Amino acid sequence: MKRISLTQYLVEEQRLNNNIPAELRLLIEVVARACKTISHAVGKGALGEVLGSAETENIQGEVQKKLDILSNEILLEANEWGGHLAAMASEEMESIHLIPNRYPKGEYMLLFDPLDGSSNIDINVTIGTIFSVLKAPEGMGTPTEQDFLQPGSKQVAAGYAIYGPQTMLILTTGQGVNCFTLDREMGSWVLTQRHMQIPAETQEYAINASNARHWYPPVSRYINELLAGTEGPRGKNFNTRWIAAMVTDVHRILNRGGIFMYPADAREPDKAGKLRLMYEANPMAMLVEQAGGAATNGKQRILDIQPEKLHQRVAVFLGSKSEVERVTSYHESQ
Ligand code: AFP
């Protein structure tokens, strides 16, 4: 495949296919540049004095790592001045972040989990940045949290950066999923995979099995069938992977299929699940569907969920369509 840069890809999408407006192109380039900066900081580790806890808690009640806060600041500072955004929202900030009055405002709203998989930071295991782009509602005045509460089907772009052996950017603007690898010598993102497609069938599943005794029956039924292997109703053996960083499990699924599950369970019956709808489940659901997969909360398509709160949580079943449809059907018949 001819190697082209992210910039050339975006210019062609804008000019030739009229798929993305200039402001959205600028937004994506700014986010991609910020992810380069985050990759650099992550890669320094202890040498950059960025490991360990920041001794602060976020809105989720989770202890923040220094890199969580640094990554959040990098994204805020990179996106504030460009004139492409009306506001931002982050897993690491309780309320939305308005664009300072000294800067022009734009028509897009950016949401992100600046560093997903924080528990992997101090053990040098792959982590990532997840982002979601919405359009500001027509006639919006000063942005409020309410303006962000749009179903995932309204996203105009979504993606993640993954900081592993390679640093990669996986992006969709609604015309399929493309993957860019960071050329560290040149400092540019290079298109390395076009139109990623998730195999419909799989033999790999991802779930945190330590929660098995808390699962509700539909999940227990589905997992027990996988565990029964060739002797069971599925008639084949399955393998499991759990990286504890959603971006990494999703990246594996985009490349070779599989199903990722973080269900609600009996540990906290009033909690819909662990993952956040607006800046984890929605962007990943858009990517997975654009790659031919499916994403539900066990009952409905994640992208159809009408959000009620900025930081609301949701159960997640995503990946190879046949598997997501099967485990979702078990919820319907319960
Ligand atoms: P952290 O950012 O706190 O490590 O959580 C990561 C995450 O939100 C998601 O990326 C993982 O898939 C999931 O949580 C792992 O959760 P468990 O630690 O309960 O397995």
Image (cartoon, rainbow, N blue to C red):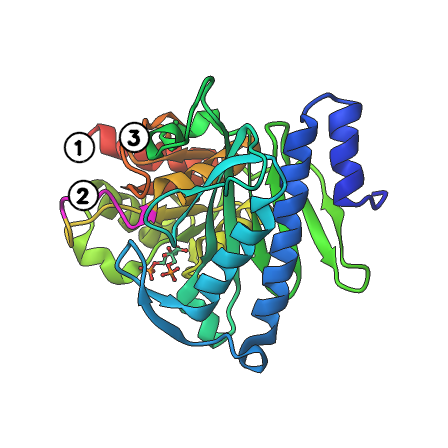
Q: Is residue 178 visible?
A: no
Q: Residue furthest right?
A: 2
Q: Residues within 10 Å of mark 3 (few under 14, many from 20)?
A: some
Instruction: Find out if the beta carbon at label 3 lies less than 8 Å from the nearest ligand 1 atom.
Output: no
Pointer 3 with pointer 1, Cβ within 8 A: no
Pointer 1 with pointer 2, Cβ within 8 A: yes
Earlier sequence position, callout 2 versus callout 3? 2
Q: Secondary structure at mark 1?
A: loop
Q: CA distance from mark 3 to mark 1?
A: 9 Å
Q: Disc 2 marks which amino acid? A: Pro
Name the residue that disc number 3 marks.
Answer: 329
The residue lying toward the viewer, choosing from 327 and 54, is 54
Magenta-span inclusion, residue 28: no
Residue 179 lies in what quarter of the image?
A: top right
Q: Residue furthest front?
A: 102
Q: Residue furthest top?
A: 139
Position of residue 310 in the picture relative to residue 86 (left or right): left
Residue range in magenta is 269-275
